[in-house]
Image (spheres, rainbow, N blue to C red):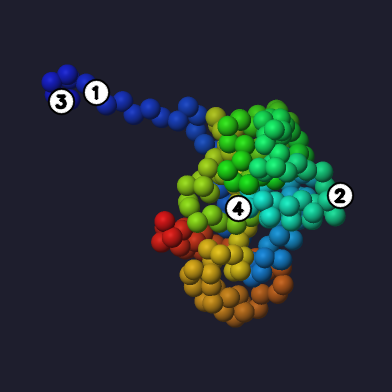
Amino acid sequence: LWDIYKLDVVVIPTNRPIVRDDQNDRIYKTKREKYTAVIEEIEKLINAGRPVLVGTTSVEISELLSRMLTLRKINHNVLNAKLHQREAEIVANAGQSGVVTIATNMAGRGTDIKLSPDVKKAGGLAIIGTERHESRRVDRQLRGRAGRQGDPGSSVFFVSLEDDLMRLFATERIAGLMDKMGFQEGDVLEHSMLSKSVERAQKKVE
């Protein structure tokens, strides 16, 4: 067919190169340590003038993080099925300096998060995933909320050995490794090899 009509195949590149910084997963022993680290990371990012979008796998985790942020007196918005009327408004403001938005991974995807020039200078939108989803596609969609149209941004997933996905593979081996290395409470294990192992676990589930 191509020969008959002499058609050329045209590959359309991305409009602008992606400059988002996709960081290695940060792995903690327990969920408690993980959520504490998430709150500390949010505090650090908003002090740097960056907006933060926190992706969760459930409404329950969104509400838990909301309570933790409230205890730290950190202003934030929660986006979930209970607040769908305000979804577009919350997402539209999610790119402002120091704004924290907690959303289930599937929420608010129809509205672009626009960044101000000051936010772009500060490093752009920061994406924090509080758990690896069973589907890599969902995680990629969350990462893709930052770094749109060549904007700066970053993404990182916080993982604990108590997460459902982590229980499916070699959790005891990683826990043993942490013990041998003398890990104390709150210490983080971070390596590209581990991030790839998590993705292999997701592939098995898929």
Q: Is residue 156 above or below residue 77?
A: below
User: 164 or 144: which is nearer to us?
Assistant: 164
Looking at the image, tell me whether mark 3 or mark 4 is earlier in sequence order.
3
Disc 4 vs disc 1: Cβ atoms closer than 8 Å? no
Q: Is residue 79 above or below residue 151?
A: below
At a point 62% along the width and 37% down the height, the residue shown is 108
Q: Is residue 70 left or right of residue 86?
A: right
Question: Secondary structure beneath disc 3?
Answer: loop
- Residue 138: which numbered mark, if any? none
Toward the left, the furthest residue is 4
Cα–Cα gap, marks 2 and 3: 64 Å
Question: Secondary structure beneath disc 4?
Answer: loop
> Which mark lies nearer to you, 4 or 1?
4
The local crowd at label 1, few if under 14, some if 14 to 19, many if 20 or more residues have their Cα within 10 Å, is: few
The type of residue carrying mark 1 is Asp
The type of residue carrying mark 4 is Thr
- Residue at the spot of label 1: 8
- Residue 73: which numbered mark, if any? 2
- Residue at the spot of label 3: 1
- Residue at the spot of label 4: 57
At a point 24% along the width and 23% down the height, the residue shown is 8
The type of residue carrying mark 3 is Leu
Cα–Cα gap, marks 4 and 1: 43 Å
